[in-house]
Amino acid sequence: MELVTPEVGLIFWTALSFFILLFILGKYAWKPILAAVAERENSIESALSKAEAVKEEMARLTSENEALLKQARAERDAILSEATKVKNQIISDAKDAAHKEGARQIEQARLEINNQKAIAMADVKNQVAALSLEIAEKVLRKQFEDSKKQDELVRDLLKDVKLS
Amino acid sequence: MNNGSILKSKIFNLTLICAFFLTIGAFPFNAFSQESKSEAGEKKFDPKETIMEHIADKHEWHMFGKSYIPLPVILYTDKGIENFSSANLQPAGHVYNGKYYNYMLVNNKIKVVDGNGNIDKAANKKVWDFSITQNVASMWMTGLLLLIVFLGVSSKYKKRVGKAPKGLQSFLEPLILFIRDDVALPNIGIKYAAYMPLLLTIFFFILINNIFGMIPFFPGGYNLTGNIAVTLTLAVIILVVVNFKANKYYWKHIFVPNPWWLFPIMIPVEVVSIFSKPIALMIRLFANITAGHIIVLSLVSLIFIFNSLWISPVSVVFVVFIDAIEVLVAFLQAYIFTMLASLFIGMAIEEHHHEVI
């Protein structure tokens, strides 16, 4: 029975000690410890959420970059094909122009050649005529060296001339 | 097989321990037996008396063997306060002549006696014992230890803001977080923060005293948490906190049972339940810790009951086994007390928004 009979003295000292302990520990130990733990938990939490946000941001940036790259690639392809087209156009245009120019020049050359030929032919004709005249003069001169032949010719000629 | 593996094996160690006890039993048999015989000759060994003496509170702080630290005796008498050292009451049965009365130790309790050493029952009722007993001194020691440890840990938190815990801090933080996350938060709910200091103090107070009580020599070996006065005080604190913090739903539940005709039955039952909860707390802690001490002391007493060293291996093996269980119980009872305290608080401050009466 003695075992289960509480003693007043021990109750008093236990209560007193416990309240002092509770007060000091509560004020100087539990409060700062719990606050520090809570603060650390919050900071870890926020760090984790921040990391998550950064990860998302990174993913967003990557996808954005990819899109940009894709767009750039498409643009480059478009530009290249455009350039090829333009190049071909230019080449064909140049070819056409060259053809035309060539044809024109050829035509001109032909005309020139013809002109020149005509001039040359005229010249040749003149020369031939002059030569012919000269030859004819010389021949005539030879033939008419004696007066008998001259007279004969004059008579022939006169024979031909019919007075009408 | 190499020797290393034999030395490491548990069976080898067990046989070594057994061999150790057997040799102790075999060789110095005469010396031990003579000593115990001479004691037995004077007085027959009474295990009940020994165990009860160990469990009860004392006016001296026992250290090793027969040496002890005398503690102050403070008596509140109808004539004034008596204050003297407990060394004056030694050896047992010695009558000390105080200022107002004569005192003698009877079963480790201070009793007022008359000149012939007969207990004066009328005078005893007028004398209140507020002595610093072994339990009080031990409680102050463990309280001081708690203060040193937790104020140290607290300052470490200030020094290492935002850093991972280190040393003692990392050992105690899981316990603190356990009380917070697994005891207070689920049982009390959102308002748990206000009760955290109380719950933590109760938990560590019970835990450290449970553990120190298990140490069989100075500075342990006392039985504080197995003392009904201590558990009573803790239970009353819980009772007061629960009933002072209780909200209207709690009181409505007690005094306004739902069908009106249940009033005569339910109100007494509920009023009893107010007190039965802390009483259960009180008895549980007291009984568990005291029972543990009694079992350990009984097993040790076996050696003296059989008056033979041959029984010591059996006794020691069982004591080690029970001690291992008692370490578990030390944690478990501290946990259960804290858990039930937070459960009662949680029940008292629970909000019932959906309840319409």
Image: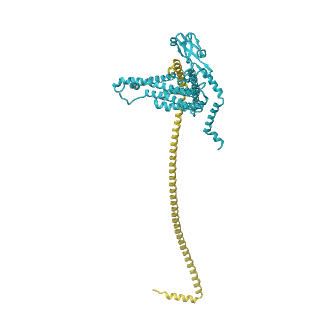
Chain colours: A yellow, B cyan
Residue B141: x percent and y percent? Answer: 58, 23
Question: With respect to residue B272, does A119 lie above or below?
Answer: below
Depth order, front residue of B161/B298: B298
Q: Can residue B64 be seen in this view?
A: no
Viewer-proximal residue, A86 or B147? B147
Indicate whether A164 appears above or below A5: below
Toward the viewer: B31 or B266?
B31
- Picture coordinates of residue B263, whole percent (x, y): 35, 24
Instruction: Determine which quarter of the picture holds residue B211.
Output: top right
Q: Is residue B332 visible?
A: yes
Tell me how many marks there are. Answer: 0
Image position of B66 (left or right of A65): right
Tell me residue B231's x, y (percent).
50, 23
On screen, A56 above or below B264?
A: below
**Which quarter of the picture shows residue B309?**
top right
Q: x and y percent of residue B136 in the render?
A: 56, 20
Quadrant holding the C terminus of chain A: bottom left
